[in-house]
Image: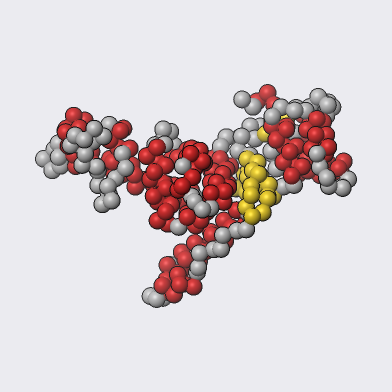
């Protein structure tokens, strides 16, 4: 039943007439579902097949506006179909649909040529937003939790919804431009002026693809809102080391030792930790699985 439902539709959005081994699909359908006085077994099974694909494609369409803008609508839908054919839904929640997308793009980079790295960066960035919006949270560390533990022994955990990204393109600024364009088009569609939409669409060109730019991003949520912010390379190194189980002292020392920046690291690190604690990024290490 699952194999029948997960098979991609035909170009006319119907169920495939032939089964994987060449038999007529209607023969397989007859083994799975009974006909009724209005629909054959094939037609009844086709309803589930179509509804599955319409729903999952619609979900990926909404979750990846940046990747859509990079590839174009047509190429994105072909990519999404190929991806879901190889990695169909295995979760009770649709939010997990994109969990294997980056892996798929690395396995089959032809779908994103000639902008492979840009597309991979965007796929990481947009999946991190899904996690930030919906992943669980642990009780945050409070100042009282830190008072009696010296930095040389202090180990912290990072919230599960926090993602730290090392990217090669300014996908954050590009995605803002994409969403602004889509919002402008939506406002034009809602206009009471009959010819507003065609004129608006002609004026709103596809955003220019970003140039290469090494950036470090933290994608997280605060007060039930999604946020992403740029970080310094050293800040990301500290957070990743803490997330990997190093003590706060070792994490900071290693990041500073590899840096070429000439700053007052004591004051800078103190400021970073104040901000990260206020955002609730830290939790008890023993609570992290």
- As drawn, the residue found furthest toward the left would be 37
How many numbered marks are there? 0
* On screen, residue 203 above or below 216: below
180 left or right of 85 in image: right
204 left or right of 16 in image: right
Residue depicted at x 49% and y 45%:
109
Name the foreground residue: 85 vs 224.
Answer: 85
Choose top left, top right, bottom left or bottom right for residue 32.
Answer: top left
Choose top left, top right, bottom left or bottom right for residue 233.
Answer: top right
Residue depicted at x 42% and y 71%:
197
Name the foreground residue: 227 vs 122.
Answer: 122
Q: Give the quadrant of the N terminus.
A: top left
Residue depicted at x 50% and y 68%:
205
Question: Colour scheme used in the picture?
Answer: secondary structure
Residue 176 drawn at (x, y percent) = 58, 58
Residue 236 drawn at (x, y percent) = 72, 41
Q: Is residue 42 visible?
A: yes
Residue 263 drawn at (x, y percent) = 87, 47
* On screen, residue 10 above or below 107: below
Q: Is residue 92 visible?
A: no
Q: Give the quadrant of the C terminus.
A: top right
Residue depicted at x 56% and y 63%:
208
Residue 79 drawn at (x, y percent) = 42, 48
């Amino acid at each position: 039943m699952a194999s029948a439902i997960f098979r991609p539709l035909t170009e006319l959005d119907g169920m495939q007439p032939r089964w994987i081994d060449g038999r007529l699909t209607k023969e397989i359908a007859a083994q799975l579902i009974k006909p009724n006085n209005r629909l054959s077994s094939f037609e009844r099974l086709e309803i589930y097949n179509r509804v599955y694909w319409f729903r999952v494609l619609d979900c990926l369409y909404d979750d990846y506006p940046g990747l859509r803008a990079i590839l174009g609508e047509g190429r994105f839908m072909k990519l999404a179909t190929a991806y879901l054919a190889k990695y169909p839904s295995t979760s009770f929640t649709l939010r997990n649909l994109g969990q294997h997308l980056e892996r798929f793009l690395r396995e089959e980079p032809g779908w994103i040529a000639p902008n492979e790295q840009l597309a991979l960066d965007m796929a990481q960035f947009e999946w991190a937003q899904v996690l930030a919006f919906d992943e669980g949270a642990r009780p945050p560390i409070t100042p009282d939790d830190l008072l009696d533990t010296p930095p040389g022994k202090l180990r912290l955990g990072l919230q599960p919804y926090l993602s730290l990204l090392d990217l090669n393109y300014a996908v954050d600024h590009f995605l803002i431009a994409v969403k602004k364009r889509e919002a402008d088009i939506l406002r034009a569609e809602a206009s009471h002026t009959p010819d507003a939409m065609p004129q608006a669409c002609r004026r709103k060109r596809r955003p220019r693809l970003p140039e290469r730019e090494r950036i470090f991003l933290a994608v997280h949520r605060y007060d039930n809102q999604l946020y992403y912010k740029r970080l310094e390379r050293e800040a990301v190194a500290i957070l990743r080391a803490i997330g990997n189980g190093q003590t706060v002292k070792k994490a900071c020392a290693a990041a500073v030792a590899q840096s070429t920046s000439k700053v007052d690291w004591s004051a800078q690190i103190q400021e970073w930790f104040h901000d990260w604690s206020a955002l609730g990024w830290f939790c008890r290490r023993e609570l992290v699985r």
